[in-house]
Amino acid sequence: QEYEEQGYVANIVFTCGTVLIGDELFCYYGGADTVICLATAKLNDLLSLKE
């Protein structure tokens, strides 16, 4: 997304914290040192990628 690429420090995305609620993972991350974003995924979906 543009807001993740353009800002105080361009092209930087970094995690701020992750929370597991039930089987859903909530990953908070900063984009371009200007915004905080949230990505979600089902834990089982992520684990299946490992196999």
Image (cartoon, rainbow, N blue to C red):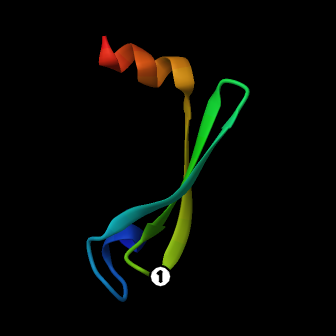
User: Which residue occupies 33% across, 79% down?
Assistant: 6
Give the x, y percent position of residue 3: 42, 72
Q: Quadrant of residue 48?
A: top left
Where residue 42 appears, as percent x and y from the top left, is 57, 26
Q: Quadrant of the N terminus?
A: bottom left
Can you name the residue that lies furthest to the right here?
Answer: 22
Numbered-mark total: 1
* Horizontal side of residue 2 vs 19, given as left or right: left
- Residue drawn 47% across and 68% down? 30
Q: Position of residue 43 (x, y in %)?
A: 55, 25
Residue furthest to the left in view is: 11
Q: Quadrant of the C terminus?
A: top left
Q: Residue at x 32, y 18 (%)?
A: 50
Report which quarter residue 37 is drawn in: bottom right
Q: Residues within 10 Å of mark 1 (few under 14, many from 20)?
A: some
Residue receiving disc 1: 34
Indicate left or right for 9 with 19 as reference. left
Find residue 11 and report its horizontal and vertical position in percent. 26, 71
Q: Viewed as shown, does residue 31 lie left or right of 39?
A: left
Q: Is residue 46 left or right of residue 12?
A: right
Most extreme residue toward the top is 51
| Type of amino acid under label 1 | Thr
What residue is at 66 percent from the left and 24 percent from the top? 23
Give the answer, above or below, for where 9 lies relative to 11. below
State the SS at label 1.
Answer: loop
Residue furthest out toward the bottom: 8
